[in-house]
Structure formats: structure tokens, C-alpha cells
Image (cartoon, rainbow, N blue to C red):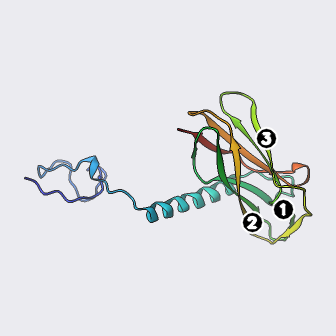
Amino acid sequence: MCKVKIRPYIPSALHPLRSRGRSSGCTPSRTQVPLLDDRRLQKRQSRMRNILFFMIMASTATSSWAGSLKLVLVPTSTTIKPNATATFDVYLYNSSRNPQKAPDLQVMSGGYLVLGTGKAEGWSDIGGTIPAEHILNANSAEHRQIKMQISAAAGKVVQVYVEAGEKRSLRSNWAVVLVQN
């Protein structure tokens, strides 16, 4: 009878203290990985969302707003159910050293493209009438969470974007979600 401690499975090639040639007769199995509790999982998802936000923000191309305002779209989940509502975080970021006129995030339009079909599948207005522009401070960001109805079958990949401002002059990056059952 072999006593095995419950610990995460680490292949011996990657484990710094375990040698390749020796074996104690007990081999850890892949089923010994402990499940993450909800708090750790939420913390990890939040950390990944923040990392994704900053990576997208760094790679976003300049816009027609003097190149200093960026609209960043981040999905709250990378998978959605077929013909369901998806939730996204929208950030408006002013990367300049000066305050800038910015569109209000209460009024946006959004669209999505189901890959493999070759055409735009949906378009929706998010909000009401266009309010006046406001001033966004230097090196600051605004946040809003939006929901969009996406009609796509299971197994499809969907690209989503949003536009803000008068005449839709500020456009976000493409966010990608997978439709699963």
C-alpha cells in the first residue's frame, strides 16, 4: 500500500526537485489535481481580464479622435450559449497627456460577424439619443458593461465590435467569443 499526498500533477521533466530516473513506486495520477475554489477562480478570471484589457489597449490602432482616445471591448466570458445574450466590458481610454473631448458611453452601436458565413450577421443600437460630448481626463479610462443579443449556432466563432460617438467615429477592437452548448 502506497501513501500518496494530494498535490497538483507536475510532470517530472518540469519539477525542479524530482529526478527523471528514480521512482518510489507511486506515480501521481492526473486525477490528483485539486479543484479551484470559487474565490481563486474569480480572482484568476479577473486577473486574466485585466491582462487582456491592457494587451488589447497596447495593440489598439489609433482612431479618428486625434489618436489619443481608444475604445476597447473585452468579453466577460470567452464562450456563450447559442442564440444568447453576451456581456462585454467597454473601456474608453484617453492615452494623451491632455484632457480630450470624448463621446458618452451610454450610446453605442454594436455589430458582430459569425466566422465562416462571410457576412455581417447582426447590428444593434445600445442606448438612446446621442448626448453631448464630455471631457475625459488625461491618462484615464471610463468603463461600461453592455449586453448584446448574438444569434449564432453552436460551434461557431463570433467577432464582436462596438462604435461610439457621433456618426460612429470611434470604433473598438474585435472581441472573439465561441458559441458552445
Q: Position of residue 11 (x, y in %)?
A: 29, 49
Q: What residue lies at 67% left-to-right and 53% top-to-bottom?
A: 88
The first of marks 2 and 1 along the sequence is 1
The first of marks 1 and 3 along the sequence is 1
Q: Which residue is mark 1?
A: 104
Observer-nearest of 144 and 85: 85
Q: Which mark is residue 142?
A: 2
Q: Which residue is mark 3?
A: 123
Q: Position of residue 38 (x, y in %)?
A: 44, 62
Binning the other alpha carbons within 10 Å of mark 3 as few (below 14), some (14 to 19) or many (20 upward) gives: some
The amino acid marked with disc number 2 is: Glu
The amino acid marked with disc number 1 is: Asp
Kindly state the secondary structure of the residue where label 3 is placed.
Answer: strand
The residues tagged by marks 2 and 1 sit, at their Cα atoms, a distance apart of 9 Å
Kindly state the secondary structure of the residue where label 1 is placed.
Answer: loop
Kindly state the secondary structure of the residue where label 2 is placed.
Answer: strand
Q: What residue lies at 72% left-to-right and 48% top-to-bottom?
A: 173
Q: Position of residue 64 (x, y in %)?
A: 86, 52
